[in-house]
Image: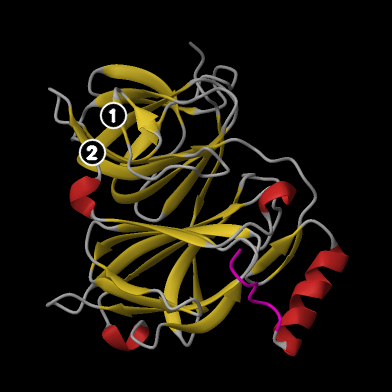
Amino acid sequence: MSLRPTLETRRAQPTMEGAGVHLHRAFGFHDPSELDPFLLFDDFRNDRPEDFERGFPWHPHRGIETITYVLSGTVEHSDSLGNSGQLGAGDIQWMTAGSGILHQEMPQGNAQGQMHGFQLWANLPASLKMTAPRYQDVQGTEIPEIFEDDGTRVKVVVGSFWGKTGPVDGIAADPQYLDIFVPPGVKKTFPVDTYRRAFAYVFEGSGAFADASAPSGVLLEKEVAGEELNIRDMSGNRTLVRFGTGDEVTVQAGPEGIRFLLISGAPIQEPVAWHGPIVMNTRAELQQAFAELNNGTFIKPAH
């Protein structure tokens, strides 16, 4: 077994999207090879309805898959194909935009006015860019959860982990999407396929991700729960942790415990031509997509 090194730890940055939704972006619109096959990750968490209720009105997508995971509040969605529905707390939607879709997402707060969710964009390989759009809407009750004797909890949203398999399937990036809680003071190791790109996103509590890759003395040496670990600074709320290669990730939970997403996927390793919500392989394909948006041929007939 080899520990994945921590390549980078950085805070998600506040930004605004849609019709004025305040959110935090962990990555996106920079180097698409950095976390290939993943392109963008947003944390849309807010307890002020005026900062999110205008939502994400009608907009197009092509060439990608969008993964929406709701923790608090609801998201009403509808699209140009006639689909509509509501995502509630704990629910997930995996939308394969494929050849093209127009849709809207309108968040609503819970009884306390709170809204919290995540959206991840995953790229599609050239062979699937123009596939037919589809949805996988999954209720939170369908997501398997693993309970360890030490208090660790793992929700298997997508992929297989510790004998459980998530309900979403047939995804191009063959991802693993885990929602993990490690209780205060507990040190835990999680396996990750060696050939996948991987990152963690911390959204509750804090902890330290062990890093065995650096020479002695380069990283801070801290004593946590009676053990000395070479670790980077504690990662807290809204922190992205990007990992190098290896087949396991170790985290030491802080005094409040730590909750984070651990996400990995097989890199596509293809050229990326990207503008806004449309991601293709070449500039010509990108130009064609926007020309079709202008002339009304963006949405393809079902076969």
Whichever of labels 1 and 2 marks the residue nearer the N terminus, that label is 2
**Residue 283 disc label:** none
**Crowd tier of the residue under label 2, counting other residues whose Cα lies within 10 Å: few below 14, some 14–19, many 20 or above:** some
Residue 219 magenta-highlighted: no
**Crowd tier of the residue under label 1, counting other residues whose Cα lies within 10 Å: few below 14, some 14–19, many 20 or above:** some
Quick check: 232 above or below 299?
A: above
Q: Residue at x 30, y 23 (%)?
A: 162
Q: Quadrant of residue 93?
A: bottom left
Image quadrant for the C terminus? bottom right
The magenta segment? 297-303
Quick check: 116 above or below 6?
A: below
Residue 302 magenta-highlighted: yes
Q: CA distance from mark 1 to mark 2?
A: 7 Å
Q: Position of residue 23 (x, y in %)?
A: 43, 72
Q: Which residue is mark 1?
A: 164
Contact, mark 1 vs mark 2 (Cβ under 8 Å) = yes
Q: Is residue 251 left or right of residue 57?
A: left
Q: Residue at x 79, y 81 (%)?
A: 291
